[in-house]
Image (cartoon, rainbow, N blue to C red):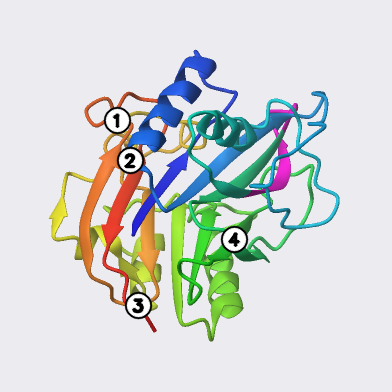
Amino acid sequence: MKLLTLNTHSLVEEHYTEKLHAFVQAVSEEQPDIIALQEVNQTIAEMPVITLHGGYVPCADGIIIRRDNHVCNAAELLRSQGLEYHWTWLPLKKGYDKYDEGIALMSRSPILETKIIRTSAMDDYNNWKTRKILGIRTEAAPDEWFFSVHYGWWDDPDEPFQGQWQRTKAALAGHRRVWLMGDFNSPAEVCGEGYDMIRNAGWQDSYALAKNKDGGITVGHVIDGWKDKTESTDGMRIDQIWCSEKTEILSSKVIFNGENRSIVSDHYGVIVHYERSEG
């Protein structure tokens, strides 16, 4: 199976429409089985979508999909090219004072079930530090859960990474195989912080397991959320794909970095190919 994760920075990006089409073109050619997206925005003041096609699966009651919703428009563009993706989106909080900011998942296979886990201590839609993760099970892999995640920073005084990770672990206890895909805000290069906490809990970094890999860097410059950090943010690997079990990873590649596809966000994406075993 092929997995893709990307923090989209959607609607905020310059030349957004061009970048949306570049993303859709790459997906139509790569055809990942599962896509996890973060910072998936829609404008709060935009009109709702009147008719949603059958690929949309609501993950909670009362969610309104608006006309500039990033994942909705990506799915519709793919559909117009003959490629059907099933998708779900969860609004988490108000972003940039004008967006419903959320997380999303897209799947080539029909979605059987969705799951929402609150990872932050707070649950305040008007506070940008509110965090949740969103998961799906699919017909093609009914024994596996795939989550789109976006965590806070290790040293955040209000919502530190440690607490969010402990809530994640507690909520996922007893699940056989889980994939966490997204923006961890925990550089793999930094010892003794979030990356090591996940690894020491027994989770497997797909990049470390990959038989074929590149340099892995997913942030090549200063981005939102890191501008007040004292350490250098050049060359971080904060967008990651973890599995709760050791799995045969055939390849792990950075995508949308200007070398492997054009840049479409302030983050680069990660695309992983793994060998799925039944049972």
Q: Residues within 10 Å of mark 4 (few under 14, many from 20)?
A: many
Between disc 3 and disc 2, whose residue precedes?
Answer: 2
Residue in the picture at 40% in, 35% down: 28
| Element type where label 2 sits in the image | helix
Mark 2 highlights which residue? 30
Residue 175 location, x and y as percent?
A: 52, 81
Residue in the picture at 57% in, 39% down: 39
Mark 3 highlights which residue? 245
Residue lying at the far front of the rendered structure = 82
Observer-side mark, 4 or 3, equals 4
| Element type where label 4 sits in the image | strand
Residue in the picture at 53% in, 17% down: 17
Q: Is residue 143 left or right of residue 159?
A: left
| Element type where label 3 sits in the image | loop
Mark 1 highlights which residue? 257
Residue lying at the far left of the rendered structure = 211
Rendered position, 121 above or below 222: below
| Residue 96 in sight | yes
Numbered tag placed on residue 89 in the rendering? none
Quadrant location, the C terminus:
bottom left
Quadrant location, the N terminus:
bottom left
Between disc 4 and disc 2, whose residue precedes?
Answer: 2
> What amino acid does circle 3 point to?
Glu
Q: CA distance from mark 4 to mark 2?
A: 20 Å
In magenta stretch: residue 95: yes
Q: Is residue 200 left or right of residue 62?
A: left
Task: Please provide the residue range marked out in magenta.
Answer: 88-99
In magenta stretch: residue 235: no
